[in-house]
Amino acid sequence: MVGFYDYGLVVLSVLISMLAASATLALAGRVAAARSKARLSGLMGSAVASGIGTWSMHFTAMLAFNLSVEVLYDWPTVLLSLLPAIFASAVALLVVSRREIKSLRTLAGGILMGGGIAAMHYTGMAAMRMPAMCHYSPALVTLSVILAVLASLLPLRLTFLFMEEASRWGWRMAASIFMLGAANPVMHFTGMAAATFTRSQVVPDLSHAISVSTIGVRVFAIAPMMVLTGALVVSLVDQLHKSLGQLRALAAHLGTVREEERTRLAREIHDELGQALTAIKIDLSSLRHDLPADKKQQSESVLKLIDQTIQSVRRIATELRPGILDDLGLVAAIEWGAEEFESRTGTKCRLDLPKDDIVVDTEHATALFRIFQETLTNVTRHANATEVNVRLAREDGTLTMEIQDNGKGVSEEQFLAGNSLGILGMRERALLLGGELSIRGAPGRGTTVRVRIPVPPSTSPKVEK
């Protein structure tokens, strides 16, 4: 008997195989990142999801094959064929989730994975029930197994390489997906070419046989594709969360480095440059007594210029890193910042602060003070306010700071619509410490910025007596 293929289903089976390969390699990252028991459970779950894809590809391709007789399937054998598919996927996940390259292990993984694919195929073929006999060409059967092993070995090896060379991850990942996805179709259609069918008068065992012509595509293709897509989406979401965590860790590191550099520069400017200018002023003042009368007036203007430069140096050093924050603490720094804001802008600043300093570590104090500074900057630029109220308190194990103005009222959405990097920076400072920042505003009623940051037990705020 001569069979023929429905090429639409053939294409669908190849697409399912590629999706299964994508899920396998994507899930390998989750397995690699997991630890101990979580790693084992992740491997099992990922193997089941990926194995379903491999199994789905095979039976979708089987549905694409048509004979002149009705073909039924023994459903226990169909389900049994899922086990080698899961085994093959588990081998692939276990091998590619390891970071170190070992040729023998890679070879063993390719052989086991290719053997699992071949076992799934021929177990699935054994599930066919029809008034015909199936004969196999030993040479083509052997070739199909060899191709399955080679088609599995190459992507496993390439996966090792793209894990080692992250800069070339994109094209190596695509090549691995293509070759791993090709392993199933190559083996399957070579195995089908090894089979010949002849009519038989022998009645097959139909006790567990069912027809899948009506619901076959739904069971073997659509449902597994949904499972694979879900697994792939979960893996991609995990990767996005991981990338976001890495970006936030980098932002935290850069923020710490920036604060350390600002502290160093402020100290050097204040100490070295300030002391040098003070020494110049002292020396020039002593020299004035020996200058002619017509030169004394000129030296007076030079002294004024030196005084102005000293004030500029102090201002620059303070803007870089207020020494009062390190020397006297957060409460004193906010008092100083409010006074400086009021004198610079003319906007009244009312404070509701603890009588004594709240003792916190440098990281928490710096984050709150920088949020305070950025909020006052936004008030100056956008609010047109005449009064600002600032409250700092300890509430339920957290540090809470509220800054409310009586300006025109700008909501968080309006700030973000203008791509405010300042607002994003404030939120990231709070999030990096496990806190939250909210902005509420209403036209004509002002804006309130509220930040809450939990304090670790080791740095729990307390009031000094």
Image (cartoon, helix red, strand yellow):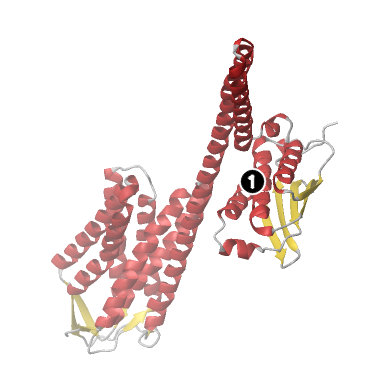
- Residue 85 placed where, x, y %? 36, 64
Mark 1 element type? loop
Residue drawn where x is 26% and y is 49% of the image? 107
- Residue 322 placed where, x, y %? 66, 34
Give the side of residue 128 with respect to residue 385, left or right.
left
Q: Residues within 10 Å of mark 1 (few under 14, many from 20)?
A: some
Q: Could you say which quadrant of the image residue 87 lies in?
A: bottom left
Q: Where is 274 relative to 157, above or below?
A: above
Residue drawn where x is 53% and y is 40% of the image? 253
- Residue 59 placed where, x, y %? 33, 75
Residues 402 and 285: in front is 285
Q: Where is 429 relative to 409, above or below?
A: above
Residue drawn where x is 62% and y is 18% of the image? 296
Residues 385 and 202: in front is 385
Give the side of residue 392 with respect to residue 128, left or right.
right
Q: Could you say which quadrant of the image residue 414 lies in?
A: bottom right
- Residue 84 visible in the current orientation: no
Q: Amino acid at mark 1?
A: Leu
Quadrant occupied by the N terminus = bottom left
Residues 366 and 52: in front is 366
Give the side of residue 132 with respect to residue 336, left or right.
left
Residue occupied by mark 1: 433
